[in-house]
């Protein structure tokens, strides 16, 4: 991760893509979101979704995994250039998370995002808070998922 | 009798759980979906702002989801959710914490375009075994109507 001072509002990134297979959708749902339209094709066919769909939390969790792996790649590149990377602190939460369209079996979601706000933390000297807007888009170019994130990022001058 | 939109009155509150969150569950979830040191490794986690191993915020979300699903949605006409207004992660969830969900119906309305669907706005407060609020969430939940 870049240090807080080096992050610019409007900075955009593509973090990665993921294809949702039926066994993966069902396994996630059985653990965390056991509703019929996430678990069983026949029940899903009878629901208003018409087909098996991924839990919205599954869509969100995959974004987090891809984001962490993306940041890890950037950190490795920075290390290779002889540069330091900033630590990322915890997040206070998120806002306006929208599951705009269902994620169906076989859909490939590409996740991207941009920085929308940055400010120095009042309570944690040496840390800033960045806010981002994050998106998921399916293979047909339709946005299926979005939310506004926030996280602590270390300052260079910490 | 399944519960329909009509059965969730404005102001109604119900509490579900607790569910104990184990160290193994915290690490398993983080390994798969949020592989950051503060969620994976006690020594590394001690060096972070959270000061010790804690569950991923997204893990907290699915713990909330499971409590909601088992407690409120299992025998209902739930049609899922279009999204979350806000989720505040207020305190870390530690290994061994026992999490309960206090769910309140804030308000409700029938869909104008699809009258077979009702929208409820649910507030979910997650509480630990000490009664401390560890998360606060508001989302819209869709339920089928009894008349539909």
Image (cartoon, rainbow, N blue to C red):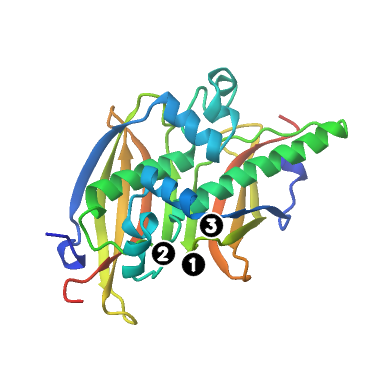
Q: CA distance from mark 2 to mark 1?
A: 7 Å
Q: Residue at x 61, y 53 (%)?
A: A18
Q: Secondary structure at mark 1?
A: loop
Q: Chain of mark 1?
A: A
Q: Position of residue A67 (x, y in %)?
A: 63, 45
Residues at marks 3 and 1 touching, judged by CB atoms closer than 8 Å: no
Q: Say which of A103 and B112 sits in front.
A: A103
Q: Position of residue A50 (x, y in %)?
A: 39, 70
Q: Residue furthest right?
A: A81
Q: Residues within 10 Å of mark 1 (few under 14, many from 20)?
A: some
Q: Residue furthest top?
A: B43
Which residue lies under the disc numbered 1? A100
Q: Position of residue A14 (x, y in %)?
A: 70, 55
Q: CA distance from mark 3 to mark 1?
A: 11 Å
Which residue lies under the disc numbered 3? A147
Which residue lies under the disc numbered 2? B82
Q: Quadrant of the N terminus of chain A?
A: top right
* Label of residue B100 in the image: none
Q: Residues within 10 Å of mark 3 (few under 14, many from 20)?
A: many
In the rendered structure, which disc, 3 or 1, sits on the residue that comes first in sequence? 1
Q: Is residue A126 visible?
A: yes
């Amino acid at each position: 991760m870049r240090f807080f001072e080096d992050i610019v509002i409007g900075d955009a990134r593509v973090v990665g893509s993921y294809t949702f297979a039926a066994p993966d959708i069902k396994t996630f749902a059985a653990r965390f979101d056991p509703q019929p339209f996430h678990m069983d094709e026949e029940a899903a066919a009878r629901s208003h979704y018409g087909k098996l769909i991924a839990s919205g939390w599954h869509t969100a969790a995959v974004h987090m995994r891809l984001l962490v792996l993306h940041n890890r790649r950037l950190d490795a590149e920075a290390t290779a250039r002889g540069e330091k990377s900033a630590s990322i602190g915890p997040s206070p939460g998120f806002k306006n998370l929208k599951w705009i369209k269902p994620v169906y079996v076989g859909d490939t979601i590409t996740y991207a995002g941009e920085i929308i706000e940055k400010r120095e933390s009042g309570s944690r000297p040496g840390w800033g808070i960045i806010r981002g807007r994050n998106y998921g888009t399916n293979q047909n170019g339709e946005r299926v998922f979005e939310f506004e994130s926030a996280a602590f990022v270390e300052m260079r001058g910490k | 009798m399944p519960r329909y939109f009509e059965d969730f009155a404005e102001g109604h509150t119900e509490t579900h759980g607790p569910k104990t969150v184990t160290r193994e569950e915290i690490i398993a979830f983080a390994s798969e979906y949020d592989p950051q040191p503060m969620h994976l490794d006690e020594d590394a986690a001690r060096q972070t702002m959270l000061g010790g191993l804690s569950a991923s915020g997204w893990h907290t979300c699915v713990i909330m989801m499971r409590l909601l699903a088992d407690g409120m949605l299992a025998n209902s006409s739930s049609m899922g959710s279009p999204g979350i207004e806000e989720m505040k992660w207020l305190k870390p969830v530690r290994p061994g914490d026992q999490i309960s969900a206090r769910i309140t119906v804030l308000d409700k309305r029938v869909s104008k375009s699809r009258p077979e669907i009702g929208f409820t706005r649910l507030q979910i407060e997650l509480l630990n075994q000490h009664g401390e609020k560890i998360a606060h969430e508001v989302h819209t939940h869709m339920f089928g109507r009894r008349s539909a």
